Image (spheres, rainbow, N blue to C red):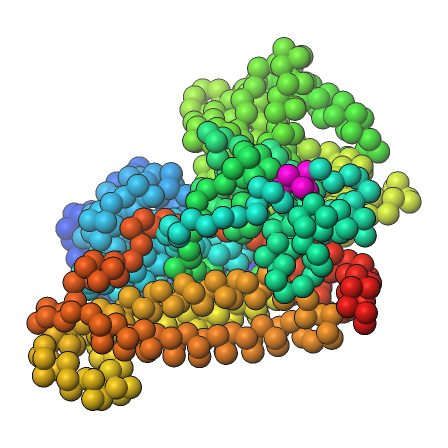
Amino acid sequence: MIKIDRSQRRLDSIYADFIQKANNNHWGNLTEDKLVALLRECVQRDERIAEAYSILKEIIRRKTGLTLFDTQLMAAYSMQQGHIAELPTGEGKTLAAVVTAAILALQEKPVHILVFNDYLSRRDYNANLSIYTACGLTCGYIIGTSDFSHRKAAYSCDVVYVSAKEAAFDYLRDFLCTEREQLLFNTFPVALVDEADSILIDEARIPLVLAGNADSRPSMAAQISKAVSELSEYDLEANPADNQAWLTETGIESMEEKMQLGNLYTAENADALAMINAALEAKLLLEKDKDYIVKNGSILVVDESTGRVAENRRFPDLLHQAVEMQELGSQDAPSVIYNSMSIQAFLLQYKMLCGMTGTAVSSATEFRGMYELEVDVIPPHIPCIRLDHPDSIFLDKEEQEAAILSCVQSSHAKGQPVLMGTQSVQESEHFSALLTQQGIQHCVLNARNDAEEAAIIAEAGKPYQITISTNMAGRGVDIRLGGSDEKEAGFARSTGGLFVVSTGINRSLRIDNQLRGRAGRQGDPGESQFFVCLKDLTLETFFEIEFYDYKKYPKLLRRAQRVQEGKDAEARYMLERYSHILEEQRKNVTDYRTQILLDLKVPGIIQKEEPALYQELVDRSGNRGVTIAEKQLTLYFINMNWATYLAAMEDKRSGIHLMIIGYRSPLDEYQIFAVSAFDEMTADIKRDVVDYMRICKITENGIDMDEAGLSGATTTWTYMINESASQFSRIPHLVKSMSNTIKGTVFTLQGLWAKLKRKLHY
C-alpha cells in the first residue's frame, strides 16, 4: 500500500501537470510536414517534451482516427521515465507504447518493443507502421520464421517489434558467429516490454538455450523408464504440495535389482540416479494435458501462466527425456548446449528498460529488486464498474461443477457473454463436454488450438457467446462487447457485460486479476466470480490449507495465495543467487569472444604460451596467416569449451542437493566449483589453441576449418527450459534448514541417510 500511495501522489502531481501542458496545445491547422519538423525540434529539449506528446497525439489521430486518452499519455510518459506503467486491460497500452517508442527513437535511442509472442509482433507492427513512417522513423518486426536478412534489416530500424525470447535467441546465436557480418546484436539500446509482469517476472528465470546435435550414445533411459513403470505403489511416495517424489526402502532395493546397480548412491551410479529421479518426476509429479500435451509425436510443454503450449520450450534435459520415454517409448537424439541464459539476464543488458502491463503493482517489490524498476499505477480513463463477486467455496467437485454450470447457463439464457477460465487443458475439455451434453454451443481456447486464439478472443464478447480458456495471461487481445459487430455491443451491455467465471484460483493473485481484468474494459459493465473446490488437487498442492471453519475459507484461500506468492518470489531470488556467478562468467566469455571477433583484441595465446612455436609459425606462414588462424581457433575452442563447462555446471547442480548431507552450504559449494571449473576451461582453451596451431595447416588466409574437422555444429536450434518443477528451483528450502526431506525428485534425507549408513557401515 505504501508503494501505491507514493506512486499515486507522483502521478497526481508531476504526471498530471505534464498532461495538462500537453493538452494546452492544438495543431489542427498545421500540415503533416510542419508537425513532424516541430516534433523533431521538441524532442531534443526536455522543457518541450509535453509539446512533443501533443504533436504525436495529433499525428496518431490523423493516421488512425483515434484520440489518445490522457491515461495513455500518462502511461507513455511513465515508460519514458524508465518505469513500469500499470494500465488496465482495454485502455490502449499498445498505442501508449508507440508514443514512448517514437519519442525515444527521435532522440536517437533505438527501441526494441518486446512483446509476448510472434502474433503480437506482426500485429502491432502492421497496426502502427504508418505512425512511425509519418514521424520519419523506420520500423520492423521479427518472428520465429524470419530469415537472417530480415532480422538484420529489422534490427537496424529505429523501432523493432519482436518477442522477448526471439530477441534473446538472436543474441545467443551471435555466440556462434565467426564473421563480423553474421552478428545481429551490436548494442543494447532501449527495451520496452509489453506484458511486463509475464516476461519480467513469470519467465524471468527460464533458461533460453542454444543447442546442437551431439554424438549419439547408448542410454539407460528406456530401461529405467520401464523399471520405474513396473514399481508397485509400495515402492513410491510423493508429496505434490512440496513437489517431492522418492523411492521407499523397498523401491530402492527393487531399482537396484532391476538395474543391477549394486549401491545406487555410489559415484559410478550418479548418471543412473539422475535418470531415476527424472523418471519419478515424470511419473508422479507431471500431469499429461496439464503440464504437457502429446501432439504429432512430440512432447509440448504447457505454460502454467498462459495455459498454452510454450513454443520452443522443454523440460530440463533428463526430465524431458523421461517424459518422452514414458509417453512415446523413445527419445530424441542427444544434444549439446552451446550457450544459455535467462530472460532476466538478457534484459538487464539493455541501457534502458521500461514496460507496461495490466497487473504489476502486486509485484512492485520484485520489479524493484530484480530490475530496479518502479511501478506507476495509471487509473482507467473511465472508472471500472465491474462487479467482482466473492469467491464461491465448495467441499466437493460435483457441487462446484454444478454451481459453475448453473451460473453459465443462467448467464447464457439472457444472452450474457461468458469467459470461463480453467486450470488445465484437461479441465477445459471436461467442461466443454459438460456444456455439449447440455446442448450449449461454445468455443474452446487451450494449448491444442492456440493458433486460432485471436479469432476466438475477438468474438468472446458477443451476446450468447461462451468461451472456455485455460488462461488469459499474455494473450494481448481485448475482448470487446459485441465482438466484431458493434450493433450487438449495446445488447451485451444490457445483459451485464462479459461474465468471467474461473474454475479455481491460481498461484498468484496477479494471474487471477489478469483473468478478471478481461471484463469491464473502458467503463463497460462486467462480472467475475471464482468457484473453488476445497478438494481440488491444485489447492492441496499450492496452498496446503487445513479446512476447519467454513466461514473463514475465502480469507484463508487468499491468505494462502499470498504465502504462495512469497514462496515463488523467494525461489526466484535464490535462483538468481545461484545463477549470478554463471551469468558473470558468461558475460566475461561473451565480451572476450566479441572483442576477438571484431578484431578489437588479439588472442596472443601462442606468443605468450609458446613463443618459440609462434616465431616458427610466423617464419613459415607469415604474420597475417598466423593471426587469422589463432583467431579462428580461439573462437572455435571458446565455443567448444564453454559447452563443456555448461555441461559440467549442469551435472554439478543436478547433484548439489547431496551437499546438505555433509552439512555444507550448497550455494558455497556451487560457487567454489564454478570458479574452479571456469579456470580449468580457460586453461583448456589455451591448450587446445596451442595444440591445433601446432598440427593444422596454416596459409596466408588462416586455416581451412572444414578440412581440419573443426567446423562446429552442422545443426543448431533454440528452446526454453521449463524449470518450474526442477530440482534447482527447490534449493532455497535446502539452504534454509536441514529438513527431514530434500525437496524435489530425490530421496528423503532420512531414507537416504539410513541407506548410506547401511551400505557404507557409517
x 32%, y 68%: residue = 637
The answer to whether residue 185 is seen in the rendering is yes
x 52%, y 37%: residue = 330
Near-viewer residue (318 or 505): 318
Choose top left, top right, bottom left or bottom right for residue 594. Answer: bottom left
Is residue 343 depicted above or below 453 in this figure? below
Magenta stretch holds residue 581: no
Magenta range is: 225-229
Is residue 91 depicted above or below 41 in this figure? above
x 62%, y 21%: residue = 432
Choose top left, top right, bottom left or bottom right for residue 660. Answer: bottom right
The answer to whether residue 56 is seen in the rendering is no
Q: Exactly how many numbered labels are in the figure?
A: 0
x 61%, y 35%: residue = 288
Is residue 275 depicted above or below 12 in this figure? above
The reply, left or right, for residue 533 in relation to residue 470 is right
| Residue at the far top in the pictured view | 439
Locate the N terminus and report the quarter of the image it occupies.
bottom right
Locate the C terminus and report the quarter of the image it occupies.
bottom right
Q: Position of residue 735 (x, y in %)?
A: 70, 69
Q: Position of residue 145 (x, y in %)?
A: 30, 41
From the image, give the main secondary structure of the stretch colored magenta.
helix
Q: Position of residue 493 (x, y in %)?
A: 56, 26
Q: Position of residue 255 (x, y in %)?
A: 71, 48
The reply, left or right, for residue 713 in relation to residue 627 is right
The reply, left or right, for residue 262 in relation to residue 372 is right
Is residue 426 depicted above or below 5 in this figure? above
Magenta stretch holds residue 226: yes
